[in-house]
């Protein structure tokens, strides 16, 4: 019993020291020359992952800094780790920090926004120690004014495609990347990438294409070789496009602003050795030509790509009147989302129901692949031997052979049992009206004269109207 109580106490103690995540917003009011911050703090755990900090209208992201602490009190260890995002105001006025959600260590944290007022610049309180180094440090080390110089950068922004010419409906990959040479010595840094990318994509995305976005979440460098030179490529945006018509796909020139630091001409241990500046990098325009598909009665409706068929059926020995499932799987590379179901029609031998559809899409290595499955239920009505290729066919344009091709079933089913095609008629109840047809008298008779009833009804109506008129005039 005592041992159980000790275990329970330890579990409660551990729970009280579990991970705690806190996101703190800066003050409600700052000066135009002051910074505003959002601080993300994780206590009693390591900060393993977190989302991007939000973009705020009226502020510009300055960058992040980290801070960690560890306390030992009465033998108990507590720790915390913080990431601080600094924002610089762009102008005076009131800005709204919207509500936002950040994912920290795979857990979502909801933060309520606020309004921040940016007032006139305020005079900073002088730090006596900083004053000493600011005023005398340079003289002490023999420099009165440090000069910052701009270093030539060896980097560029480029939009590339894996194809220069495609058929209508044929996919091609477009990637917007920032390349930095291994020989580059200029300090560069991304900033406000989310806001910039939103504006860039408004210009880049063509209106006459279906898009399959690769949804790049983390920008990581990868080594590539261009010509004989080594670069690090940072993919910013990647998607596969599928033209809907023969209009050329035109990607215009876009720009990406980067933080580029100027470095001190005479760097030292003390003081500032680099100064923040900005530079815009521009991509070159790019055009992809679109060819028309060869003439075919279905050329405006077929899928384009490289596909194959796989099919599943519990058994090819089936019985009339009993439903059975049949799965028609189309898999391969292409615009999986646009694949249409095979056209299947009912006849005297089978009754087909609308299929259940399932789709799996995979985007990787500049390719979009996947499977679209159509699960049919069919009911055989006549016994016999049937080739399902007479019912299930799917036409597409084969890119490998550059011609139209057909995927058709290879299964043969054997139907046993009694014919059921007349059961539908027998099962219908036509009602009592039709049941009396056989016993009803079908001889011709003269229609009876009911004119006396009409005369009596007319006299009754006249008397009612006369009585009403008498009462009205009497009053």
Image: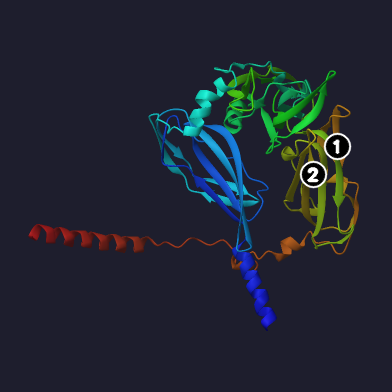
Q: Is residue 257 visible?
A: no
Instruction: Residue at the far bottom: name it.
Output: 1
Give the residue at mark 1: 406
Give the residue at mark 2: 371
The secondary structure type at the circle numbered 2 is: strand
Q: Residue at (83%, 23%) from the top-left corner?
A: 225
Q: Residue at (67%, 21%) from the top-left corner?
A: 251
Image quarter hosting the N terminus: bottom right
Q: Nearer the viewer, residue 135 or 468?
A: 135
On screen, residue 343 above or below 106 = above
Q: Position of residue 292 (x, y in %)?
A: 76, 22
* Left or right for 234, reference 57: right
Q: Nearer the viewer, residue 381 or 359?
A: 359
Q: Nearer the viewer, residue 281 or 91?
A: 91
Q: Position of residue 72 (x, y in %)?
A: 62, 58
Instruction: Residue at the far front: name it.
Output: 140
* Left or right for 323, reference 400: left
Q: Residue at (74%, 49%) from the top-left corner?
A: 358
Q: Nearer the viewer, residue 380 or 91?
A: 91
Q: Position of residue 38 (x, y in %)?
A: 52, 42
Image quarter hosting the C terminus: bottom left
On screen, residue 310 above or below 384 = above
Mark 1: few/some/many CA within 10 Å (<14, 14-19, 20+): some
Residue 428, image quadrant: bottom right
């Amino acid at each position: 019993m005592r041992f159980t109580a000790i275990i329970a106490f330890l579990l409660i103690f551990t729970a009280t020291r579990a991970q705690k995540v806190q996101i703190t917003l800066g003050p409600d009011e700052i000066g135009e020359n002051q910074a505003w911050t959002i601080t993300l703090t994780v206590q009693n755990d390591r900060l393993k992952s977190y989302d991007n900090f939000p973009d705020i209208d009226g502020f510009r992201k300055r960058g992040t800094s980290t801070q960690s602490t560890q306390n030992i009190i009465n033998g108990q260890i507590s720790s915390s780790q913080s990431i601080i995002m600094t924002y610089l105001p762009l102008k005076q006025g009131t800005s709204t920090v919207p509500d936002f959600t950040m994912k920290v260590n795979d857990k979502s944290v909801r933060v309520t926004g606020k309004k921040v007022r940016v007032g006139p610049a305020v005079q900073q309180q002088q730090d006596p120690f900083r004053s000493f180094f600011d005023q005398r440090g340079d003289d002490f080390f023999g420099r009165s004014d440090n000069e910052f110089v701009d270093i030539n950068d060896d980097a560029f922004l480029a939009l590339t495609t894996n194809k220069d010419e495609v058929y209508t409906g044929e996919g091609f990959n477009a990637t917007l990347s920032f390349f930095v040479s291994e020989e580059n010595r200029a300090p560069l840094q991304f900033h406000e990438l989310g806001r910039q990318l939103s504006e860039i994509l408004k210009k880049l995305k063509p209106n006459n294409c279906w898009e399959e976005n690769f949804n790049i979440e983390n920008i990581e460098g990868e080594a590539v070789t261009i010509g004989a030179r080594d670069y690090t490529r940072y993919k910013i945006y990647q998607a596969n496009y599928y033209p809907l018509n023969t209009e050329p796909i035109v990607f215009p020139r876009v720009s990406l602003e980067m933080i580029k630091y100027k470095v001190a001409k005479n760097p030292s241990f003390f003081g500032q050795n680099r100064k923040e500046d900005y530079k815009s990098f521009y991509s070159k325009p790019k055009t992809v030509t679109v060819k028309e598909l060869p003439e075919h009665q279905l050329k405006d409706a077929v899928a384009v790509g490289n596909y194959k068929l796989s099919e599943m059926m519990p058994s090819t020995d089936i019985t009339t009147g009993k439903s059975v499932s049949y799965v028609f799987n189309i898999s391969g590379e292409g615009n999986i989302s646009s694949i249409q179901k095979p056209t299947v029609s009912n006849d005297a031998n089978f009754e087909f129901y609308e299929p259940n559809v399932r789709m799996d899409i995979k985007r990787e290595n500049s390719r979009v692949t996947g499977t679209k499955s159509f699960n049919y239920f069919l009911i055989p009505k006549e016994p016999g031997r049937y080739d399902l290729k007479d019912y299930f066919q799917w036409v597409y344009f084969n890119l490998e052979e550059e011609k139209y091709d057909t995927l058709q079933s290879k299964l043969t089913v054997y139907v046993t049992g009694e014919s059921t095609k007349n059961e539908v008629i027998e099962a219908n109840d036509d009602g009592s009206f039709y049941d009396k047809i056989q016993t009803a008298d079908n001889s011709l008779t003269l229609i009876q004269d009911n004119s006396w009833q009409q005369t009596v009804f007319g006299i009754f109506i006249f008397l009612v109207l006369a009585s009403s008129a008498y009462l009205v005039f009497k009053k």
